Amino acid sequence: MKENTSKLLILYASQTGNALDAAERIGREAEHRGCTVKVFSIDEFDASFLPHEDTVIFVVSTTGQGDPPDSMKVFWRFLLQRNLSRHWLEGVHYAVFGLGDSSYQKYNVTLLVVLNY
Ligand SMILES: Cc1cc2nc3c(=O)[nH]c(=O)nc-3n(C[C@H](O)[C@H](O)[C@H](O)COP(=O)(O)O)c2cc1C
């Protein structure tokens, strides 16, 4: 069988721990399938290095009144800067997994903002 040597970066943004749990679970599943996995809180990773990654999974929750978790504030500002090209993640395989609750008016807003890039 061909060995899977894919490198996967998982970045999570969590307020109360659920996104962390989900990120670690995804990481374990990927490792079982032969991927080399790194899991970081989003505030531990310099976003300017993202275009150099091969595959990234964002696991992000929404908190407050449609706000990103505290750990995501810096990354959030990075995403909203005016001069950030819409193509900045071109060439990177990425997926976004959002945790939210549909009883809130601003359901899963963090996911939607990250997906927009
Ligand atoms: C105080 C509070 C505010 C929340 N606000 C929202 C919200 O505005 N939109 C939403 O979709 N979910 C909201 N949620 C639901 C969370 O996104 C959901 O519980 C999620 O699993 C939390 O993930 P975390 O533990 O990684 O932060 C809120 C939850 C709490 C406790």
Image: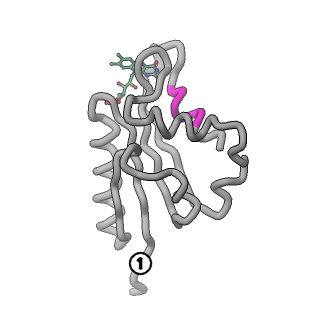
Q: Give residue 114's quadrant in the image.
A: top right
Magenta residues, dominant SS class? helix
The answer to if 26 sits in the magenta stretch is: no
Q: Quadrant of the C terminus?
A: top right
Q: Is mark 1 within 8 Å of ligand 1?
A: no
Instruction: Tell me the quarter of the picture where residue 3 sits.
Output: bottom left
Which x, y percent locates residue 29? 32, 59
Rendered location of residue 49, percent (x, y): 52, 59
**Ligand 1 position by quadrant:** top left
Given residues 32 and 117, the one toward you in this image is 117
* Numbered marks: total: 1
Taking the image as shown, residue 94 lies to the left or right of residue 7, namely right
* Disc 1: which residue: 4
The quadrant the N terminus occupies is: bottom left
**Tell me, what colour scheme is on the image?**
one colour
Q: Amino acid at mark 1?
A: Asn
Write the start and end of the magenta stretch as one range: 108-113
Q: Residue at x 46, y 32 (%)?
A: 73
- Secondary structure type for disc 1: loop
Q: Looking at the image, which is closer to me, 14 or 49? A: 49
